[in-house]
Image (spheres, coloured by chain):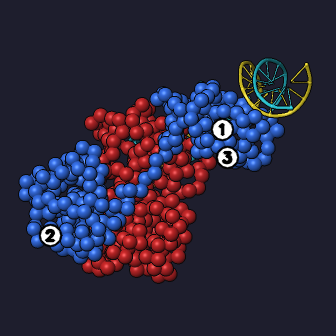
Chain colours: A blue, B red, C cyan, D yellow
Amino acid sequence: MRVLLVEDDRRIASDVSRGLRASGYVVEVSSDGEDAWFRGDTEDYGVVILDLGLPGMDGLAVLKRWRANGRTTPVLILTARGSWAERVDGIDAGADDYLPKPFQMEELLARLRSVVRRSSGHASSVMTAGDIRLDERQMKVTLRGAHVTLSPLEYRLVAHLLRNKGRVVSQQELDENVYGQPEEHDSNVLEVLVGRVRKKLGPDLIETRRGFGYLVPEMPA
Amino acid sequence: MRVLLVEDDRRIASDVSRGLRASGYVVEVSSDGEDAWFRGDTEDYGVVILDLGLPGMDGLAVLKRWRANGRTTPVLILTARGSWAERVDGIDAGADDYLPKPFQMEELLARLRSVVRRSSGHASSVMTAGDIRLDERQMKVTLRGAHVTLSPLEYRLVAHLLRNKGRVVSQQELDENVYGQPEEHDSNVLEVLVGRVRKKLGPDLIETRRGFGYLVPEMPA
DNA sequence: TGATCCATGTCAGCAAGCTGTCATGTCGGC
DNA sequence: GCCGACATGACAGCTTGCTGACATGGATCA
């Protein structure tokens, strides 16, 4: 992992970067605010370790400019011991964590792990098929970019079929996942439901496998 | 937002919870490890504040068991001053941040904001959606720059939805985070509350996902 | 103490639209 | 062509969520 270490004290910089390298990080050092800002804005680092007292541009300002530009690279700031006001400011400026000086190398490494772990923990919730796009987080379905309103049952049907794209899903399985009851409906509710969905999302999304169930194909017809 | 405060010192617990409530959190206090573990494992909190020295079950053990069960609720641990080994352990056990005792209420609040913000992927204590701007630090809400006065419940509703911008939030989740009770209201308080907020902040801020809950969309309609 | 304000809960009525049913039409395989 | 599986349109009943009006109760202040 690539780390940008922004620190103007040469001795600290060298100690820390040695420790980081020993732990398998690729380290780049910057000792000046302007330079740090430029690099952080143009390059892609896994983490930034940022000292607040800097020549050129203040560390907080650097951080704020990154965040204002939408950079989400995790940032760990180094603050003077005991100055909790500084920490509050740093955190509110968008820092992911701070470490009061002086610190043990071991502690720095632990916080680095934690910061990185956190920032890499998101999974995508979007599924697509043909022109259809379903965002599970927003429970939003679009057809060629246009928002389509689905009822709760319709939504669950589509979501379950999309989650199982490329596989034939039996009526019983759909019953269980849409209605939550394994009991067989004596009527044709499911077929009606499929019909309503097809009317809203187009006839090609859901294919019928006579005698087996329904299927959202891997490739649109 | 719902907070679980795990602290066995009654005085600290009462001071802190008072401060938290004053800042708009819904606070539940637990003073014993077993109890804390059980609650954290069964209930859904926005954050947990965890003191390490506990009767019953040790704080670290509680945290580890949560993580082992896949709970990702952000946890802020309180440690004795200067014991950095404890911090390292805590962070590697899955804590999201730590705060050395003694601390200022203000700092606790800032770190809480930061931990919560991170875990929901936001970058600043100011959250926006369309023309609406909410500053968690000041508990201030503005609409097109003009200050809007919200009641406590209204504020909590908006804050929770904004913290989860782009995600559908169920009525039950709102209940828990606004009222602090998982119990179902038999009445329509929440709908009334939403209505009141919409009247103050405009009808487009909060979208309804019939049958599922409410949502503040990523992009204004 | 009484007057008043405000936050909050309750309720009833309304509109939208969701959902199951049924009658009837269509399709595919044998 | 026949049969069963599936599709479709219409409709009635019901749910859901929204809204305005009102009740309650706590806080504040004269």
In the rendered structure, find residue A14 and report the number of the disc placed on it.
2
Residue A59 location, quadrant: bottom left
Please name whichever residue, A25 or C15, is drawn nearer the observer in this view of the structure.
Answer: A25
> Is residue C7 shown above or below A207?
below
Q: Which residue is mark 3?
A: A177
Mark yes or no: residue A14 visible. Answer: yes
Disc 1 packing (10 Å; few <14; some 14–19; many ≥20): many
Q: Is residue B130 above or below residue B49?
A: above
**Numbered disc 1: what chain?**
A
Residue A152 visible, this angle: no
Label at residue A215: 1
Instruction: Please identify the residue farthest to the left as the structure is shown.
Output: A55
Q: Which residue is painted at 14% across and 59% down in the image?
A: A30
Q: Are marks 1 and 3 in contact (CB under 8 Å)?
A: no
Q: Earlier in the sequence, mark 2 or mark 1?
A: 2
Amino acid residing under circle 1: Leu
**Which residue lies at the image location 72% right of the left edge and 35% below the top edge?**
A209
**Residue B208 badge:** none
Q: Residues within 10 Å of mark 2 (few under 14, many from 20)?
A: some
